[in-house]
Image (cartoon, rainbow, N blue to C red):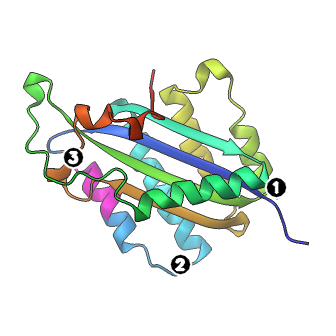
Amino acid sequence: MGFTHSIFALELCLQMVPGDPLRAHLQQLIEQHPAHSSRRDKWRLYRDVSQLLQGRLQYAISGCWDFFDDDGRALNDFNMWSGGMTTLEGARRTPSGPADPYRGDHRYMTFTMALLLQHGTPSERSFAHACNVPEAALWKRETFARLLNSLGMISWASVKADVIYLIPRDDSFGLTAEDLRAPKFEYLRPLG
């Protein structure tokens, strides 16, 4: 008999600040990560990504996260999150042009990660406990900081699959406020 699964997924939408290399650093981490990597390599990638994101949470305008330890839902949701990497779902077809922050015209990026975990392992259960957040705190930056920090408690021996991606790949295709109002981004919750 096979094991059952849990899923943790997190997405943040952050304002791209002119001169801040966050998007470029995240892209570099993803692109330089080997396709076939050791557990230690994965741990380092997620540690580095988590540190970068935690250091810029003040620029996060919206986000979402999920943790489910129902096997069917975990598998279905992981396939959905993985699909975002292989579709044009969040991509613009044309460049958005330069931002004009002095007129309130900003550009945004989304960063997504999803982990398919082996349910019942000690690290999965510890992480499940970290995800037990009161409803009033679900969409707070502090909660996202806590979850990003808690990724370090996951043993990569418990991770059966993962996906990590960034939109846009190029600064000139930054998402606009109008892009973020599209139905495909409805799941992102404003952060407090």
Front of the two marks 3 and 2: 3
Where the C terminus falls, by quadrant? Answer: top left
Q: Is residue 38 left or right of residue 131?
A: left
Q: Against 12, is 37 above or below?
A: below
- Rounded to the nearest angstrom, the CA distance separating label 3 from label 2 is 30 Å
Q: Against 16, is 3 above or below?
A: below
Q: Is residue 134 visible?
A: yes
In the image, which disc is placed on residue 37?
2
Q: Callout 3, which amino acid? A: Gly
Is residue 22 one of those drawn in magenta?
A: yes
- Rounded to the nearest angstrom, the CA distance separating label 1 from label 3 is 40 Å
In this orientation, which residue lies closer to the viewer: 43 or 27?
27
Q: Against 50, is 27 above or below?
A: below
- Rounded to the nearest angstrom, the CA distance separating label 2 from label 1 is 23 Å
Highlighted magenta segment, given as a residue range = 20-27
Most prominent secondary structure in the magenta stretch? Answer: helix
Q: Secondary structure at mark 1?
A: helix
Label 3: how many Cα within 10 Å (few below 14, some 14–19, many 20+): many
Where the N terminus falls, by quadrant? Answer: bottom right
Q: Is residue 49 left or right of residue 151?
A: left
Label 1: how many Cα within 10 Å (few below 14, some 14–19, many 20+): some
Task: Work out which residue is located at the far front of the displayed protein and give it.
Answer: 183
In this orientation, which residue lies closer to the viewer: 72 or 121?
72
Going from N to C along the chain, the mark reached first, 1 or 3, is: 1
Q: Position of residue 161 (x, y in %)?
A: 62, 67
Q: In the rendered image, which residue does mark 1 sit on?
A: 122
Q: In the rendered image, which residue does mark 3 sit on?
A: 174
Q: Callout 2, which amino acid? A: Ser
Front of the two marks 1 and 3: 3
Q: Is residue 55 visible?
A: no
Q: Position of residue 78 (x, y in %)?
A: 61, 57
